[in-house]
Amino acid sequence: MKVKKERFIELLRSTGREGIEEVINYLEKAGFFTAPASTVHHLNYEGGLLVHSLNVYDMAVAIRGAIIAMKPKMAEKLPEQSLIIAALLHDTCKANIYKKTKKWNLGNSWRPQLVEAYTTDYSQMPVGHGEKSVIMLLSLGLKLTLDETVAIRWHMGAWDLAFQSYEAKSNINEAGNRYPLLSLIQSADNIATHILEQ
């Protein structure tokens, strides 16, 4: 995990973005690099969130390359710096929410066993997933572009509970039409979660 953490930090620093050091310091203190990516589904082990974030970045780079090969003019609408920021920081909201616990599990036997697991605690900042990441990053002083803000805010797509409202549905549709980075990050996140990490 040490190599992955170093790569993650090096990529963020390569952006030269104002506020990036404050974000890195926060992620370290909040346990981002040791957190799981989920409690039950993908990468639900220590360091899973770091692995997931890098998987999303690597997938986003691959998708961007394919898009640019087909439509070279898209390179200016999908700058590498924005790809790094949105892919690596889309799940900033998951820092400091996971707590270790014990759960009963049947596993492969008929006898239940008490195993180590994770639970979540959203009490520190109970707002939605994508908007929480944006709020946290902005409050840390990170200068986000509008397309990065939109990509991080809506990266959950239809899985976001707020998607149930008409206004949210209209906003996400408009965001998808205007900001190609959003579709790129959504796709990379979905492929990482449902294909690479299963």
Image (cartoon, grey):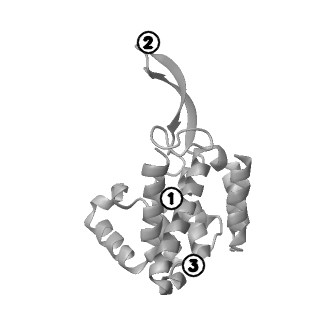
Residue at the image point whose x is 62% and y is 44% from the top: 47
The circle on residue 47 is none
Q: Quadrant of residue 36?
A: top right
For this rendering, which residue is in front, 70 or 15?
70
Residue 63: x and y in percent read 49, 68
| Left or right of residue 28, residue 80 in this image | left
Q: Amino acid at mark 2?
A: Arg
Residue position for label 2: 111
Say few, some or many: other residues with alpha carbon within 10 Å of mark 3 (under 14 / 14 to 19 / 20 or more). Answer: few
Residue position for label 3: 79
Q: Is residue 185 above or below residue 195?
A: below
For this rendering, which residue is in front, 71 or 160?
71
Q: Is residue 180 visible?
A: yes
The CA distance from mark 1 to mark 3 is 24 Å
Q: Amino acid at mark 1?
A: Lys
Residue 134: x and y in percent read 53, 65
Residue position for label 1: 132
Residue 18: x and y in percent read 69, 74
- In this view, the residue farthest toward the bottom is 73
| Left or right of residue 129, residue 172 in this image | left
Residue at the image point whose x is 38% and y is 74% from the top: 175
- Mark toward the start of the polypeptide (1 vs 3): 3
